[in-house]
Image: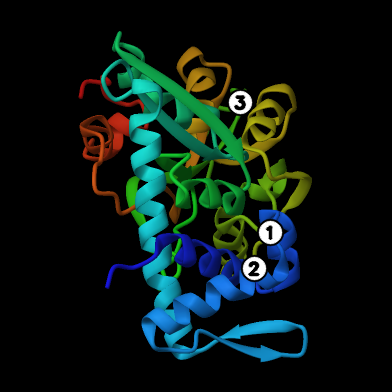
Amino acid sequence: MRLNYHHLHYFWAVAKEGNLTRTAARLRVSQSSLSAQIKALEDELGQALFLREGRSLQLTEAGRLALTYAETIFATGNELFALMKDGEFQKRQTVRIGAVATLSRNFQENFVRPLLKLDDIEIVLQSGTLSDLLTRLSVHSLDLVLSNRKVHRDAQNPWLSHRIARQPVSLVGKPRRSRAPFVFPDDLAAFPIVLPGLESEIRAGFDLLCEQQQVTYKTLAEVDDMAMLRLLARDTDAIALIPTVVVQDELRTGVLVEYCVIPQLYEDFYAITVKRHFQSPLLRSLLKRRDKAVLGELPAFM
């Protein structure tokens, strides 16, 4: 017997939605027709795939296994479609990269800079929340997602999190009149400070360090967006807790200076992918670069 992929698609759609009525409406088929298609698949496989609990459907053990296979099958189909769509595989290569909206724009530009020198490449850059970008990655509408958070894989979501760079976190601010070096944490109380938001891992590490050393500080602002953190560091008299890649241009021109590096505090940058049958050689080259190249501290050769 050969597997009926039409039946499998209906099963997959219902399993993802968890509701027969809503799935039937979305697919524009009758509920009875949808039930019949799933029953036909169960007969083909010789296993019940759903248990009814009130108005909802719950997957059986066989159903969960079938869903795992269905996810792989349809993800591979989406990958094939994205690869061959409109003949792009034979023409220009399109690289689709998503980035968490709060991620440093400098880091994003440094990451894609080697591609900007190539004539036969079209780059699509999209921003959004991590969950939204991962959804797009799972159906192969994105090739890669940039994030400062590692994503843990599971049976339903086989993410691959590549740590592509790590950078110490620093305190930066406008040039000081005093020639005496800034001493952390002793001099911290003398300046208002701009910090990443409470959900940031940088902020959590900084607060823990201050608590351990019994240090207090005066907060001027908390911001989630690195672009805004950069502006506040540049346009106020506060110091900012920030990876230096975010303010690389200001440090280079002397608008800002690095007061100190915070001991044992780092920001990690990740490129998140999913396993694909065909991975662009360009992406493989991007992922193999050294930390300093990804952070813009070395020439962007591939």
Give the CA distance from mark 3 to mark 2.
74 Å
Q: Residue at x 64, y 48 (%)?
A: 188
Give the CA distance from mark 1 to mark 2.
7 Å
Q: In which quarter of the image is the C terminus?
A: top left
Q: Where is residue 10 in the image (x, y as percent from the top left)?
A: 55, 64
Instruction: Give the mark, 3 or 2, whose residue is nearer the N terminus.
Output: 2
User: Mark 3 highlights which residue?
Assistant: 176
User: Mark 2 highlights which residue?
Assistant: 33
Q: In this view, does 300 lie above or below 83?
A: above
Is residue 193 something that shows in the picture? Answer: yes
Q: Position of residue 275 (x, y in %)?
A: 30, 54
Q: Which of 193 and 62 is in front in this view?
A: 62
Circle 3: element type: loop
Label 3 neighbour load within 10 Å: few <14, some 14-19, many 20+: few
Q: In which quarter of the image is the N terminus?
A: bottom left
Circle 1: element type: loop
Q: Closer to us: mark 3 or mark 2?
A: 2
Instruction: Give the mark, 1 or 3, whose residue is nearer the N terminus.
Output: 1
Circle 2: element type: helix
Q: Closer to us: mark 1 or mark 3?
A: 1
Q: Where is residue 201 in the image (x, y as percent from the top left)?
A: 56, 58
Is residue 181 something that shows in the picture? Answer: no
